[in-house]
Image (cartoon, helix red, strand yellow):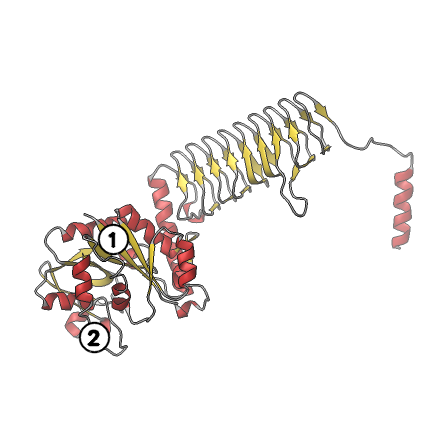
Amino acid sequence: MDFASIILAAGKGSRMKSDLPKVMHEVGSAPMIDHVLKSADKAGAERNIVVVGFGAETVAKHLDGRAETVEQTELNGTGGAALCAKDTLAGFAGDAIVLYGDGPFVRPETIRAVLAKRSEGFDVVAVAFAPDIPDGYGRMIMNGDALEGIVEHKDCNAAQLEIGLCNLGVISANADVLFELLSKVENNNANGEYYLTDVISVARAAGKRCGVVLCESEEATSVNSRMQLAEAEVVFQARARAAAMENGATLTAPETVFFALDTLLGADVTIEPNVVFGPGVSVENGALIRAFSHLEGCHVSEGAIIGPYARLRPGAEIGAHGKVGNFVEIKNAVIGNRAKVNHLSYVGDAEIGADSNIGAGVIFCNYDGVFKHHSTLGERVFIGSNSALISPVNIGDDALIGTGTIVTNDVPAGDLALARVKQVNKTGRGKRLMDMLRAKKK
């Protein structure tokens, strides 16, 4: 069934105490609006309409054409916000489902269940959940499988407060029907707002059939404060860790591993404790990410070993069975198949060929204070410890760079490069110098 999502994202979120639009606050290293869009897309949305308001330009710039936007100029409630999408969806023959930009955990499966329920002959379908403690939530008034109405918690009588089925806020109907119902919603309430939930009572008065789909309680997580943002992060990470293990990854201490929304892991990946994945990371089958490593904007190929205490920055590409060891930082660099950078090194803006070895303490000096420069190393290159490569330089296949060399020129294939001051021993000079310094200290 064709459907469009209408994602409400106009609120400022005053309790966040922030100049940033609420939906731009991050969970899993991604703005909350991205989570909602991902679910809608995975459920098969033909179109996504984001209703923006506070910080409209910021949200629209972030979306960058991934969704259509429409601005709610008057913040007059959820019903008024959803109605803003009417002109944008004019002529759309499918269903519309209203989602919330600050509710990042509605699953694609729930959205598909709503559409399936609609196909059973229900004109309007709402989503409900059954929390352990229902305080504060609107109650779903059911008559068999038919939804008769939604009563806000503060308006419930004693009997209604005993109802355990609560309103999530997500509602779906044929797009034309939804907008027709929304146009009849009134704002005769204490807040003078148009409530989306009133669509149910309007629909029932028009003789339309309303139904309910049940979702998991965590899908009702919404964010209105920094505390709730932290709680949402906990929910996201628990989901991400469970999904990683279900898909074949081993997490030796799951509670210490942190994922981003777009983290991709292959089968038989092993992740040791205290690993952080920033956005844009993919890890292929059989790779090992050792403890206390941080990865962002990088790709790790099959069988590679990263860490412990490694940092992969954006643009890092680690080849199959490559090794990046302890206290090594890689930035915008390709590490070839089976190549090794095992100890205390920085590799930036470089390409290192297959089977090469970068010794301990090697630095790629890629920045001159204004421009970044790129260096290229061939295959089977050996760089001795504590060497510095002043980019840009090219080092050919099978070249050897002696320990402590400052490389300022290209090194042809097969050559040995040495560039260090010749050692000179001054007889007795060491002791005399130390004695002089100790005397000055007294």
Query: Looking at the image, is 397 positioned above or below residue 122?
Result: above
Q: Residue at x 43, y 44 (%)?
A: 253
Which circle's residue, 2 or 1, is located before the other in the chain?
1
- The quadrant holding residue 231 is bottom left
Image x and y of residue 53, in percent: 36, 65
Q: Is residue 230 visible?
A: no
| Residue 233 seen in this snapshot | yes
Read off the residue under disc 2: 155
Where is residue 307 shown, x and y percent of the image? 53, 38
SS for callout 2: helix
Instruction: Give the CA distance from mark 2 to mark 1.
Output: 32 Å
- The image shows residue 392, relative to residue 138, as above or below, that is above
Q: Are marks 2 and 1 in contact (CB under 8 Å)?
A: no
What amino acid type is highlighted by mark number 2?
Asp
Q: How dense is the environment of label 2, judged by Cα within 10 Å: few (below 14), some, or many (20 and up)?
A: few
Q: Residue furthest top?
A: 414
Q: Which mark is residue 4?
A: 1
Expressed as whole percent of the image width and height from the top left, the position of residue 322 reads 52, 30
Residue 205 percent location from the top left of the image: 10, 68
Q: Quadrant of residue 126?
A: bottom left
Q: Nearer the viewer, mark 2 or mark 1?
A: 1
Mark 1 crowdedness (10 Å alpha carbons): few <14, some 14-19, many ≥20: many
Name the amino acid type tagged 1.
Ala
State the count of labels: 2
Left or right for 13, reference 414: left
> What element does badge 1 sit on?
strand
- When asked about the image quadrant of residue 21, the answer is bottom left
Marking on residue 174 = none
Q: Nearer the viewer, residue 226 or 30?
A: 30
* Position of 37 relative to 295 (above/below): below
Q: Quadrant of the C terminus?
A: bottom right
